[in-house]
Amino acid sequence: MKPKLVPNVGRVLRRAWSIRLIVVAGILSGCEVALPIIDQFVSIPRGTFAALTGLVTCGALISRLVVQENLTGDTDADQ
């Protein structure tokens, strides 16, 4: 079975909170990787970015399940 994109994929990419939070989680993961370099300038406890990434990822999961009014109405209105 071939995966099918939602009809309003561009709108979802621009407006969905789940997408925004996933991008933030990716940035925080990158910060965790860069922590040895950043640590020379600012003292940040180990695991801080990892914990924040986990929280943001949980937020993305929750936001994926919540109806976002600015994204609904195009398709699947009866589901």
Image (cartoon, grey):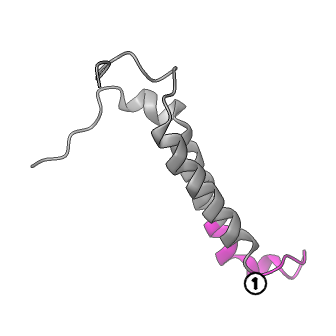
Q: Nearer the viewer, residue 36 or 49?
A: 49
Q: Quadrant of residue 32?
A: bottom right
- Graded by Cα atoms within 10 Å as few (under 14), some (14 to 19) or many (20 or more), the crowding at tag 1 reads few
Residue at the (87%, 82%) spot, across then down: 40
Which residue bears the numbered disc 1? Answer: 36
63 left or right, relative to 27: left
Most extreme residue toward the front is 79
Q: Quadrant of residue 52?
A: bottom right
Question: Looking at the picture, how far across and down is residue 75, in whole percent?
Answer: 30, 20
Residue at the (53%, 46%) spot, across then down: 62
Region in magenta: 29-46
Question: Looking at the picture, how far across and down is residue 36, in whole percent?
Answer: 75, 84
Asked whether 35 falls inside the magenta stretch, the response is yes
Residue at the (44%, 27%) spot, across then down: 11
Question: Looking at the picture, how far across and down is residue 14, in whole percent?
Answer: 51, 32
Q: Quadrant of residue 39?
A: bottom right
Residue at the (74%, 78%) spot, across then down: 35
Mark count: 1
Quarter occupied by the C terminus: top left
Question: Looking at the picture, how far across and down is residue 33, in whole percent?
Answer: 65, 77
For residue 47, above or below residue 5: below
Q: Nearer the viewer, residue 76 or 15?
A: 76
Q: Nearer the viewer, residue 5 or 73?
A: 73
Most extreme residue toward the left is 1
- Which amino acid lies under the numbered mark 1 shown in the image of this protein? Pro
Most extreme residue toward the top is 73
Label 1: which secondary element: helix
Asked whether 48 falls inside the magenta stretch, the response is no
